[in-house]
Image (spheres, rainbow, N blue to C red):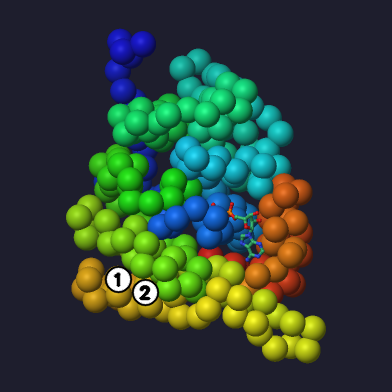
Amino acid sequence: RGGAPQKEIPFAKPNSLTRVYAVASGKGGVGKSSVTVNLAAAFAQQGLRVGVVDADVYGFSVPRMLGVEHKPTQLDDMILPPVAHDVKVISIGMFVPGNQPVVWRGPMLHRALQQFLGDVFWGDLDVLLLDLPPGTGDIAISVSQLIPTAEILVVTTPQQAAAEVAERAGSIALQTKQRVAGVIENMSWLELPDGSRQEIFGSGGGQAVADSLTRSIGASVPLLGQIPLDTRLREGGDAGTPVVLADPDSAAAVVLRGVAKQL
Ligand code: ADP
C-alpha cells in the first residue's frame, strides 16, 4: 500500500481510440444508472467493445441492472472485470464488504476511480461509460483530471426543479473544459392505453437543460432523446437484462437505441 507506482490510464493516452462518457445527473433517482446500462447494452448490440465503471458510491446499482453474477478476479497485478451481456463491468459495490455504508471522501473516490481506470484489465474498448454519483461533486473533477477527453452526458427528468440541478451538474464542464455530448430526458411521459401521453413530471426539463448548457458553454448541447416511463424498463433493470435487450421493441428501448446511435 502506497509503494506501488500508479499505472497509466490507457484511456488518457493521447492516441486512445476509446470514447469515454461520464453519465451525470443533478440528483438521484432520475434514471442515470438505467440509462447507463441500457446505452452500454445498446453499444454492445452494435458490436462495439464496451466497459462500464460504476462510480455511484451512493447507488452502485449497475451490477444488478446488468445481471453481473461474478466478482472481479485477479491476474498478476491486474483486476479482470466480470462480463455481462458482452459488457465489462467494474463497480465500487464489488469492493465494499457486505452492504456496509461507506463514507466516501473526495480523495478516496479519486483513488478508487484511478484504480478502476488504471488497474483493471479492460483490453481494447470502443466505449467506456462511467456512472457518476449524482450531484456536482469531486468525482466529476476527478474524471476530468484522470481522462481529460471524457465527455459528459446529463440525465434529467422533465421536472423544472430536477432540470435546475441537472444544469448545475452539466455546467461543471465549463470549469473542467469537457465536452457535453448531450442531455437525455427520462420519465418524460406515461403512455395511456388510448395512446395519449400523461406528463407525470411535467415537461420541458430536458430541452431547458440542453438550451441552458448550450448558452453557458457556448457550444451546441443537443437533447438526445426523451425516454417514456415504462414498466418494462424497470423490470429489465430488476431482472438484470436491460430493456434494450429484454424488450427491444418497447418505446423506451427504441429511444435508448436512438440515443446510442447519436453518440
Ligand atoms: P439513478 O441512477 O438516477 O438513481 P435509477 O436508474 O436507479 O436512477 O432509477 C431509479 C428507479 O427508477 C429504478 O427503480 C428504475 O428501474 C426506475 N426507472 C428509471 N427510469 C425509468 C423509466 N423510464 N420507466 C420506469 N422506471 C424507470
Which residue position holds label 1?
213
CB under 8 Å between discs 1 and 2: yes
Residue name at image x 56 percent, y 25 percent? 100
Crowding near the residue tagged with mark 2, few <14, some 14–19, many ≥20 C-alpha atoms within 10 Å: many
Residue at the extreme right of the image, as rendered: 193
Q: On the image, which quarter does residue 82 sit in?
A: top right
Residue 255 in picture, x, y percent from top left: 60, 73
Q: Which residue is mark 2?
A: 210
**Image quarter for ligand 1:** bottom right
Res 12 seen here: no
Give me the C-alpha separation between circle 1 and circle 2: 5 Å
Apparent side of residue 2 relative to residue 204 in the rendered image (left or right): left
Label 2's element?
helix
Total marks shown come to: 2
Task: Name the quadrant containing residue 24.
Answer: bottom left
Q: Is residue 92 above or below residue 249?
A: above
Tell me: residue 209, above or below residue 113: below
**Label 1's element?**
helix
Left of 225 or right of it: where is 104?
A: left
- The front one of 154 and 87 is 154
Q: Is residue 104 left or right of residue 198?
A: left
